[in-house]
Image (cartoon, grey):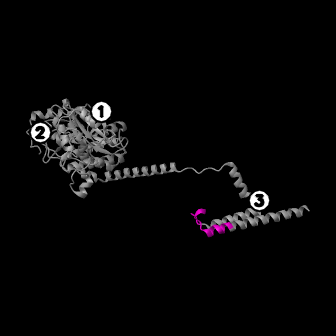
Amino acid sequence: HADAPEKRDPDSQKSSTKSLGMVPLPPVSRKQKGSSHTKQEVKNDVVSSPSPAVAASREDEKTNGQAPLVDRADTHRKKAAALPSERSSISLSDIERVYEFGRVIGDGNFAVVRECRRRDSGEPLALKIVERSKLVGREHMMQNELSLLGSLSHPRIVRLFAHHHTPTHSYLVMELVRGGDLFEAISDSGKFPEAEAGLMVSDVSEALEYIHGKSIVHRDLKPENLLRVAAGVCRLKLGDFGLAMVVTEPVFTICGTPTYVAPEILHETGYGVAVDVWALGVILYVLLCGFPPFRSRERDQEELFKLIKQAQLHFPSPYWDSISEEAKNLVRCLIEVDPTLRLTSEQTLQHPWVKAMTSVCMQRALTDKTQKKLQNAGAKIKKPQTENSEELLTNKTERHCGSKEEVTLRRKTQLSLRDDDSPDMNLQSRSFDQIKTSESVNQSMNNLVFQSKQNSQKSSNQRFN
């Protein structure tokens, strides 16, 4: 199911690189939407894709091996029974009977993405609406995405649940990822702290490790195709498998996005899954400093490709002065011109810097969660009611008034009562004997106070007489 090496026309090599579109200069100012082009027809790469591979999460694969896919995707297919078969043509009203359309959350050259929800369950979803007239000559790209993405199930990959087709449009029912894409986050933030960048590299490496384990190469890894799970949250999911393919031997087709394309693609010496790791290295470079490692000042694409082939990596001051040597080391290992020396996705996931930065982010998240719980718990505790001024005066009078002997006796009695009780015991939990003892002590105290008053009164009468 893979390509045979293709004959290349030497005269067409220069023109092939010019078809890849323009490259943005730092800071990143616009998306390269729709700029992933190919020299040859990509459909030549996608020879009738095999039947969907058994899809299971990464954890399931470790414990249960290859388990049949019985999850939300199957549930959606069953619930969509009200619709005609996915392979047959249906009408827009058929789709609207099952899904309620919402606001537009994304758009590109060939498709619009809307929020939607199932009318029966209210489950929030994303609906990718592709206008077929814009896909003339590129139908194979959507067919490829449906074939591959529908066979994948991983927490770091956007899920495809179902797809339906009208005479004019195709509707892809997908997992809703609310945080926008990484390109927008880079445009807003400029760059990211090392801890957040490391966590994002970890997420992408997990996704790549999963698809590379299935001999799938993405071939268009870039910030526009990485979605954040929520706004302000640095957790990513990989999407857009339009250029992805199953590869079992070297591929020679030139494709991808100029800024992130690997040198072996430009050299046309054959490539494999390692091109995704190169793109990840470029993304990490951008995350840490805000601009790509190879760029043409004159926006000259031939110059850009020359720089990529040479792969002379620089960390210019002052942008990289505060970045750790460990982070720079990982960048060098990913942006390695020799694909056989380049780290794999699995090795990237186990890199000390990636593990350390992921641990820092996880610890911060746990601390923030604990603090939030404490704050919520504190808000629920009612403040004790304050005694009114009259009660305070009364208590003060009872506690401090009387002769010196009365006050001393009362204090000694109170201390005696405290010593008899355990620290966590209240009146209701005392035994009957304890209560009787307390009552007798109180009675004794009252008698002593009464005698003291009498003696004081007698003394006053004697002085008066």
Task: For the N terminus, give its image quadrant.
Answer: top left
User: Pointer 2 and pointer 3: residues touching (CB < 8 Å)?
Assistant: no
Residue 423 is a magenta residue: yes
Residue, far left: 7
Q: Which mark is residue 30?
A: 1
Distance (Cα) linking label 1 and label 3: 85 Å
Q: Nearer the viewer, mark 1 or mark 3?
A: 3
Distance (Cα) linking label 1 and label 2: 31 Å
Where's residue 198, x and y in %? 33, 48
Q: Say above or below: 311 vs 420.
A: above
Q: Amino acid at mark 2?
A: Asn
**Marked residue nearer the N-terminal end (1 or 3):** 1
Toward the viewer: 102 or 207? Answer: 102
Distance (Cα) linking label 2 and label 3: 105 Å
Label 1: few (<14), some (14–19) or many (≥20) C-alpha neighbours in 10 Å: few
Task: For the C terminus, give its image quadrant.
Answer: bottom right
**Marked residue nearer the N-terminal end (2 or 3):** 2
Q: Nearer the viewer, mark 1 or mark 2?
A: 2
Residue 415 is a magenta residue: no
Range of residues picked out in magenta? 422-439
Toward the viewer: 354 or 441? Answer: 441
Q: What is the quadrant of residue 107 in the picture? A: top left
Q: Nearer the viewer, mark 2 or mark 3?
A: 3
Label 3: few (<14), some (14–19) or many (≥20) C-alpha neighbours in 10 Å: few
Q: Secondary structure at mark 3?
A: loop
Q: Which residue is mark 2?
A: 44
Toward the viewer: 250 or 460? Answer: 460
Residue, far right: 465
User: Pointer 1 and pointer 2: residues touching (CB < 8 Å)?
Assistant: no
Q: Secondary structure at mark 1?
A: loop
